[in-house]
Amino acid sequence: MSTQMPQEIEVWYVLPAIRRELAKSMIKDYKLSQKETSKILNITESAVSQYVKSKRAKEVEFKGDASKKIKEAAGRIIADNKLLMKEIYDLSGVVKVSKLLCEIHMQHDKSVAKGCDICLK
């Protein structure tokens, strides 16, 4: 396996997982349709369907505070779609602070040294 940068891990795993959780929350918590959700998130209906069925972006699981913040962000995005990019950016910061990015990085890149904290910077 090749060496991966934290930014690659974020793009390949974290951002799709954030979109997945936003889509799930919009449908489950806010009772939107897949079509409405796809328009708000600016993704295809099939992507929403795959997120809902956990066929896409299933490698990352959010818990506790991160999960709560995603649900709150979904509500803000529904209220004002112009917040989409800012909310996703802010959520990626939550993932960094929670050390989840480091955990995912270590899982996918065995060359990462134990105790590495580059993802937190």
Image (cartoon, grey):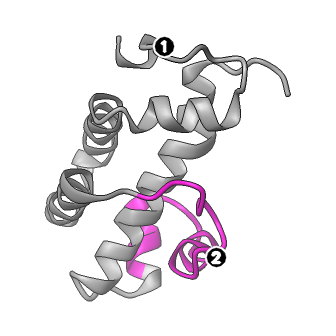
C-alpha distance separating marks 2 and 1: 37 Å
Q: Quadrant of the C terminus?
A: top left
In the depicted structure, whether residue 62 falls above or below residue 88: below
Q: Is 58 part of what is drawn in magenta? A: yes
Residue 45: x and y in percent read 57, 76
Which of marks 1 and 2 precedes in the sequence?
2
Q: Quadrant of the N terminus?
A: top right
Instruction: Name which residue type carries label 1.
Output: Cys
The residue that label 2 is drawn on is: 46
Q: Residues within 10 Å of mark 2 (few under 14, many from 20)?
A: few
User: In the displayed structure, does residue 93 sit left or right of residue 111?
Assistant: left
Residue 52: x and y in percent read 51, 79
Q: Residue at x 55, y 22 (%)?
A: 6
Q: Residue at x 70, y 27 (%)?
A: 109
The residue furthest front is: 114
Which mark, by number, is residue 116? 1
Residue 41: quadrant of the picture: bottom left
Residue 23: x and y in percent read 40, 70
Q: Nearer the viewer, mark 2 or mark 1?
A: 1
Residue 93 or 36: which is nearer the viewer? Answer: 93
Q: Is 37 part of what is drawn in magenta? A: yes
Residue 63 or 34: which is nearer the viewer? Answer: 63
Residue 46: quadrant of the picture: bottom right
Which mark, by number, is residue 58? none
In the depicted structure, whether residue 64 falls above or below residue 11: below
Q: Magenta residues, as a range?
A: 36-61
Q: Secondary structure at mark 2?
A: helix
Instruction: Name which residue type carries label 2.
Output: Ser
Q: Secondary structure at mark 1?
A: loop
Q: Residues within 10 Å of mark 1 (few under 14, many from 20)?
A: few
